[in-house]
Image (spheres, rainbow, N blue to C red):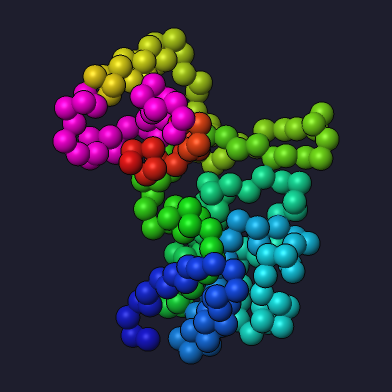
C-alpha cells in the first residue's frame, strides 16, 4: 500500500466470526490482529473466551492475548496504554492494525480518548492473598496528592457544575472537566445511576 493503512475495528459478540474475518483481512492486506477482549488478555482461559487457537495465531501476528495472569487486574487504562503504541508502530511500518473484540469500552477508549480522564492515576494489582496486595503506579502517577487548597478548589468547581446544570443547553461544557469530578456531580443528582457507572466512564456519566 502506498498510503498509510486504516485502523480496522471488528466488534461483535462471541461466535459471530470475528476471528475468521480478522485472519482473512490480515492475510490479504498485510495486517496484524490486536485483541480487544477483556478476558482474552488472561492466560489459561482459552476455550471459555473463544481465544484464537495456536494454529490461528501462527497465521498472523496477534497482540494482547494471554498477557497477564488471572490474579492480576487489567483495566481499560492498561489496555489503552498498551495498545496505542502497538497501533502507532504498525502504522509506521505500513501494517494494518486490526482491532478485534467484544469489549466495547476497550475499543471506545482508543477511538475517543475523552472517555478516560486524568483522574485515573493508580491501578492495583490483585494478588491471591489480600495481605500481598500492592499498588502499581501508572506512567502518569508521579503526581503530588491534592492538598487542602486543591480539594477546596475541586469542591468549588463541583458546586459550579451543579448550579449550571439546569440551564445547560448541551453537554459540551462538561467535557472539559475531570471524569471523577463529573461522577461526584452525578452522585448528587442521580445516586442510582452513579452507583451503576464506573467513575472513569466519562461518556456515560455525561449522558
Report the magenta residues as a range. Answer: 164-193
Asked if residue 179 lies in the magenta stretch, the reply is: yes
Where does the image place residue 25, in percent across and percent down from the top left? 49, 84
Identity of the residue drawn at 24% across and 19% down: 163
Q: Would you say residue 104 is visible in this rendering?
A: yes
Identity of the residue drawn at 64% across and 85% down: 59
Question: Is 171 left, or right, of 48 in this rendering?
Answer: left
Q: Would you say residue 118 is visible in this rendering?
A: no
Where does the image place residue 53, in percent across and percent down from the top left? 71, 77
Question: Is 171 left, or right, of 193 in this rendering?
Answer: left
Identity of the residue drawn at 38% across and 77% down: 5
Asked if residue 134 lies in the magenta stretch, the reply is: no
In the rendered image, the vertical position of residue 181 relative to residue 22, given as above or below? above
Foreground of the two, 116 or 166: 166
Foreground of the two, 166 or 136: 166
Question: Is 191 left, or right, of 23 in this rendering?
Answer: left
Where does the image place residue 137, in percent across and percent down from the top left? 60, 36
Image quadrant occupied by the N terminus: bottom left
Question: Is 146 left, or right, of 132 in this rendering?
Answer: left
Image quadrant occupied by the C terminus: top left
Residue 57 falls in image quadrant: bottom right
Where does the image place residue 119, in percent across and percent down from the top left? 46, 33
Total labels: the figure holds: 0
Secondary structure mainly formed by the magenta segment = helix
Amino acid at each position: 500500500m502506498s498510503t498509510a493503512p486504516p485502523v480496522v475495528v471488528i466488534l461483535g459478540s462471541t461466535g459471530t466470526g470475528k476471528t475468521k474475518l480478522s485472519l482473512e483481512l490480515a492475510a490479504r492486506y498485510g495486517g496484524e490482529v490486536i485483541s480487544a477482549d477483556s478476558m482474552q488478555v488472561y492466560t489459561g482461559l482459552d476455550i471459555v473466551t473463544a481465544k484464537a487457537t495456536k494454529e490461528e495465531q501462527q497465521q498472523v501476528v496477534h497482540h494482547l492475548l494471554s498477557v497477564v495472569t488471572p490474579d492480576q487486574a487489567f483495566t481499560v487504562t492498561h489496555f489503552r496504554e498498551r495498545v496505542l503504541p502497538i497501533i502507532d508502530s504498525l502504522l509506521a511500518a505500513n501494517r494494518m492494525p486490526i482491532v478485534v473484540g467484544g469489549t466495547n469500552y476497550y475499543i471506545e477508549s482508543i477511538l475517543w480518548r475523552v472517555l478516560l480522564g486524568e483522574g485515573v492515576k493508580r491501578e492495583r494489582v490483585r494478588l491471591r492473598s489480600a495481605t500481598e496486595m500492592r499498588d502499581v503506579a501508572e506512567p502518569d502517577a508521579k503526581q503530588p496528592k491534592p492538598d487542602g487548597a486543591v480539594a477546596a478548589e475541586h469542591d468549588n468547581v463541583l458546586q459550579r457544575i451543579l448550579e449550571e446544570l439546569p440551564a445547560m443547553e448541551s453537554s459540551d461544557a462538561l467535557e472539559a472537566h475531570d471524569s471523577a469530578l463529573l461522577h461526584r456531580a452525578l452522585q448528587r443528582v442521580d445516586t442510582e445511576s452513579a452507583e451503576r457507572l464506573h467513575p472513569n466512564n466519562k461518556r456515560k456519566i455525561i449522558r
